[in-house]
Amino acid sequence: MKKFKVQSLAAIAGISATVLTLASCGSKESQQMPDMTPEIATVTVQPGTADLTTSLAANIQGKTDIAVRPLVSGFVTKVHVDEGAYVHRGQPLFTLDQVQYQAAVDQATAAVNSARTALETARLTASNKQTLFDKNIISEYENQLAKNSLAQAQAALAQAEAGLTSAKKNLSYTVVTAPSDGYVGSITNREGSLASPSMVTPLTTVSDNSDVYAYFSLNEKDILDITDGGKLTLSEAIAKMPPVQLQLADGTIYPETGEVATVSGVLDLSTGSASARARFKNLNGMLRSGSTAQILIPHHMEGVITIPQKAAFEVQDRKFVYTVNDSSKTVTTPVTVSPQSDGKNYIVTSGLTPGQRVVVEGVGTKVRPDMPIKAVDAAELAARAAAQQQGAQQAQQ
């Protein structure tokens, strides 16, 4: 009986040792299991300042774009300039056939000479008649006829001189000159083409590009924004607008800032927008009339919450973000954002409160709702990645 008890105690001790050994192994294995919770970049939102830029399509026009048409009809006999040339006011651009206009001048000159001779004759006659009348040799009637003839001759000379002036003016119009300083546009009518004042297509266009105007459109909401909901007049709002920039077609920013000069006070019924104009100095003539660009209007805001655009996703025209709760799990949170954007950040107008953590990595890919994550500050994560990359580069060297 005692032998049996001893054996039983030994068996129990062996089982206990085995259990303790297994428990110890299980504890070590659990300690060695890695934490699979992913590290996700987040930002803690706080009110701050925001400098955003609104980009609007613009059409560039010169200070003056003058269509050049002749004032008389005729065939083009010479083109004095080429397309793109810079010309000064009064510089010849085209010459029209002058033969008929020169002939008209010659004819008018002859008419003036004839009228002048007739006037001298009438003046001599009137003087002679007056002498005879004073001596009572002729009647008053004859004397008056002579005076009337003199008046007619004077009127005929004036008419002939007016005709000569008109003929010379028409002759001068055969040389079409530049109406202003500027650059010559396309030339569609060359030598041999018939030109006339009623032609639909002008001979060319001269653009004064010393200053250029960038025309763009503002909708009704934009106008309410710049006038602070109507608290300012349109002229007061324009005076307070900050300098604007011009983004050229190749994406570069024009080095000279401009200012908004005018905003139309009437909305176009078809588009619901008002035409606005910004003025820029044309450095070295690099801006040409007819070019396209983007007007960049800056907006400075105080006390607003901003988030990166990559932090937001859209479902049925509503925007959402993932916030992190106290249990380190993601929560789908609806937000409202301002329509003004710089293309990289959103201004959140509702849905977030200061101090909340917002996921800015993996949105729409690896992050899901109610997902446990290890929230890491985005700046810290970026610094860690940069340090690792620098270490790898040094190791390779």
Image (tube, rainbow, N blue to C red):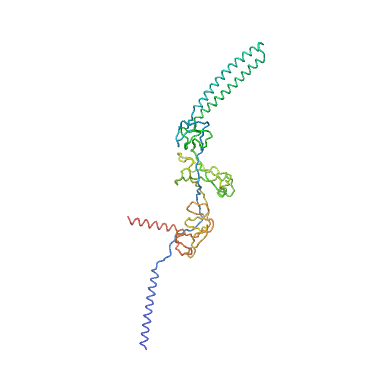
Q: Is residue 228 above or below residue 313?
A: above
Quadrant for the N terminus in the image: bottom left
Residue 119 left/right relative to 25: right
Residue 236 left/right relative to 386: right
Q: Is residue 200 above or below residue 361?
A: above
Quadrant for the C terminus in the image: bottom left
Q: Residue 225: x and y, percent? A: 56, 49
Q: In this view, does 389 lie above or below 189?
A: below
Q: Residue 259: x and y, percent? A: 52, 43
Q: Residue 31: x and y, percent? A: 39, 69
Q: Is residue 63 above or below residue 115?
A: below
In the current view of this chain or complex, which residue is farthest to the left? 397
Q: Nearer the viewer, residue 157 or 8?
A: 157
Q: Nearer the viewer, residue 59 or 12?
A: 59
Q: Nearer the viewer, residue 346 or 160?
A: 160
Q: Residue 214: x and y, percent? A: 51, 43
Q: How many marks?
A: 0
In the current view of this chain or complex, which residue is farthest to the bottom? 1
Residue 19 left/right relative to 287: left
